[in-house]
Image: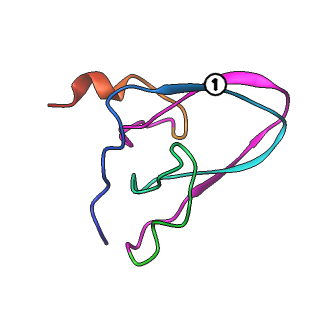
Amino acid sequence: MSEVVIAGRKPVELELEPGEYFYCRCGRSQKQPFCDGSHRGTGLAPLAFTVERKQRLKFCLCKQSADAPYCDGSHHDLD
């Protein structure tokens, strides 16, 4: 399994419409925080999640959150 890449050192806030989304867990996607298929061959897979109503959400880009895909402040602990 490949190592996770830190895609950013602070979260990104987005307003999403209801629907199913795929969160990038490998950090390699060029469409952060969403998966673009860049994980292929890494042994890592995206995380499917559903948004029930239109809302603003903060997404983890450091890929260290215990509450993925959402930011839990783990980026504050990065070196």
Q: Which residue is mark 1?
A: 57
Q: Position of residue 15 (x, y in %)?
A: 71, 25
Identity, as a three-letter code, of the amino acid under mark 1: Leu
Q: Is residue 42 left or right of residue 47?
A: left
Q: Quadrant of residue 77?
A: top left
Main SS of the magenta part reads loop
Q: Is residue 34 located in the magenta-colored stretch of the structure?
A: no
Label 1 residue SS: strand
Q: Is residue 3 left or right of residue 49?
A: left
Q: Position of residue 9 (x, y in %)?
A: 31, 30
**In which quadrant is the C terminus drawn?**
top left
Q: Is residue 54 left or right of residue 49?
A: right
Q: Quadrant of residue 7?
A: top left
Q: Is residue 44 above or below residue 25?
A: below
Q: Position of residue 49 (x, y in %)?
A: 69, 47
Q: Is residue 65 above or below residue 30?
A: above
Residue lying at 45% horizontally and 27% vertically, measured from the top left: 11
The colour scheme used here is rainbow
Given residues 16 and 48, the one toward you in this image is 16
Instruction: Give the magenta-colored segment's residue range.
Output: 42-67
